[in-house]
Image (cartoon, grey):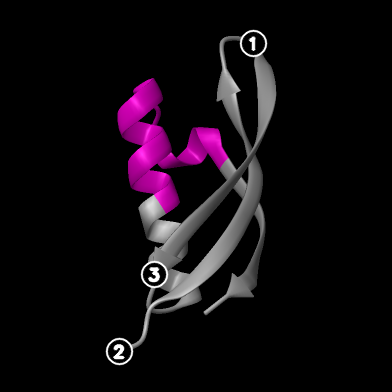
Amino acid sequence: MAMQKFEVTGACQIGDSWQPFTKVVSAPNEDVARKYIYAEIGSRHHLKRNYISIKGVTVVGE
């Protein structure tokens, strides 16, 4: 499968406030890009998925 670049935007709750984020990831499809973001942000900030809100996923390049 060909890898595409996706821009994922959203917010994550750190402390009492929601912090916006924008990440660009390489993935074969949008679903995998979402899972990668959940794993990366969850691992980095020790957050469960219900503290991460993904607003949108767009293709930015091939």
Residue 22 sits above or below residue 3 on the image: above
Q: Position of residue 31 (x, y in %)?
A: 44, 72
Mark before the other along the chain sequence, 2 or 1: 2
Camera-side mark, 2 or 1? 2
Q: Residue at the spot x=36%, y=86% of the render?
A: 2
Mark before the other along the chain sequence, 3 or 2: 2
What amino acid is labelled 2 in the image? Met
What amino acid is labelled 3 in the image? Ala
- Are the residues tagged 2 and 1 within 8 Å (C-beta)? no
The magenta region covers 37-52
Q: Position of residue 44 (x, y in %)?
A: 35, 26
Q: Which residue is mark 1?
A: 16
Label 3: how many Cα within 10 Å (few below 14, some 14–19, many 20+): some
As measured in the structure, the alpha-carbon distance from the residue carrying label 1 to the one carrying label 3 is 31 Å
Q: Which residue is mark 2?
A: 1
Q: Which mark is residue 27?
A: 3
Viewer-nearest residue: 21 or 17? 21
Prevailing secondary structure of the magenta residues: helix
As measured in the structure, the alpha-carbon distance from the residue carrying label 3 to the one carrying label 2 is 9 Å
Report the quarter where the N terminus lies: bottom left
Q: Position of residue 59 (x, y in %)?
A: 62, 73
What amino acid is labelled 1 in the image? Asp
Residue 28 lies in what quarter of the image? bottom left
Q: Is residue 32 left or right of residue 52?
A: left
Residue 46 sits above or below residue 49 on the image: above
As measured in the structure, the alpha-carbon distance from the residue carrying label 2 to the one carrying label 1 is 40 Å
Q: Magenta stretch containing residue 34, yes or no?
A: no
Residue 51 sits above or below residue 34 on the image: above
Residue 10 lies in what quarter of the image? top right
Residue 15 lies in what quarter of the image? top right
Viewer-nearest residue: 59 or 18? 59
